[in-house]
Amino acid sequence: MTTGHVSTKDNNEIFFKDWGNSNGQPVVFSHGWPLTADAWDDAMMHVAENGFRGIAHDRRGGGRSSQPWEGNDLDAYADDLAAVIDSLDPNDVVLVGHSTGGGEITRYVGRHGTSRVAKMMLVSAIPPVMIKSSKNPDGTPKEAFDQLRDGLSADRSQFYEDLADPFYGANRTGSHVSQGLKDQFWQQSMTCGLKGAYDCIQAFSETDLTMDLEVIDVPTMFIHGDDDQIVPIDDASRKAVEIVDNAELKVYPGAPHGLTSTLKDEFHTDLMNFLRS
């Protein structure tokens, strides 16, 4: 088990953790907004305990990585991921991305190809594009993202406390989401600098990843809850799976955006089946 930093071409430092068998097949995890690599600790530990090599990084703007004023966009995120992968030099990689991280791994393939990539898993992910437009009339109106920016700017601590409820479906009748899980969401989010978090809203909402999806030429699995209040499934994975060749979609009935935590055992089972397939 090791941690460290990788330097990017624009002189930022990206924190990474590298767990498990160094000779095992690498599984590279990309986290969602506004979290850190720690969001993947459960899955990282699970794959490492099963003979794989787990790698995760803190996206620029938060956690233990640099907080640049500029470059908080999907192109830079993808290039930062490339810097981590190139530095650690794994091959036959399985890319796993949650939410914005799903956009990050998609843009990575669009910019850097699949020469190191064996498979991809996108969980509650943002592709192809979230925002409503003339080309995407079913998308989420810009006003919804403006509200995120307003809430973040007004009182980011309370904003993150409130956001944890729809993120994990804690606002649904019968929910059993623990206060600890919501506290963890708040704690990770508060390590994200305001500028990076603010800019990332535009990045994850307005970036069109359709052409990047079209480049994917490895086995790909989409996982999405049909009660995702953050990234609605109909505007995301149900469209994306139709664009990617050799892709499948597994729908988790009633599951929220943060299903990797609320349905951890089921997700880990699906992840391991996919890794071993």
Image (spheres, rainbow, N blue to C red):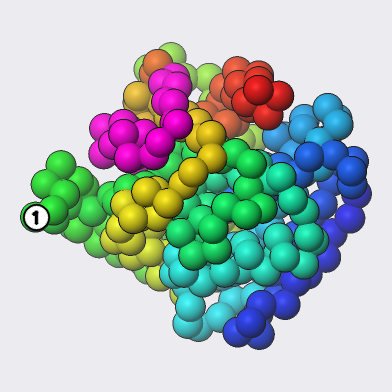
Q: Quadrant of the C terminus?
A: top right
Q: Residue at x 47, y 82 (%)?
A: 70
220 relative to 267 in the view: left or right:
left
Q: Residue at x 44, y 26 (%)?
A: 248
Given residues 37 and 30, the one toward you in this image is: 30
Report the label total.
1
Residue 246, compared with residue 273, is above or below; it is: below
- Identified at 40% across, 16% down, the residue is 253
Look at the picture and state if 128 lies above or below 148. Answer: above
Left or right of 165: which side holds 229? left
The amino acid sitting under disc 1 is Ser
Report the side of 59 relative to 157 (left or right): right
Secondary structure beneath disc 1? Answer: loop
- Residue 48 falls in image quadrant: top right
Horizontal relation, residue 75 to residue 36: left or right: left
Q: Residue 160, position in %: x, y?
A: 47, 52
Q: Position of residue 77 (x, y in %)?
A: 53, 66
Q: Label 1, on which residue?
A: 134
Residue 175 x %, y % = 46, 19
Magenta stretch?
231-252
Mark 1 Cα within 10 Å, few/some/many (few <14, many 20+)? few
Q: Please tell me which residue is depicted at 59% across the width and 76% down the height of the picture.
A: 67
Can the viewer see residue 256?
A: no
> Which of the 4 quarters of the picture holds residue 239?
top left
Q: Where 190 sits versus 128, above or below?
A: below
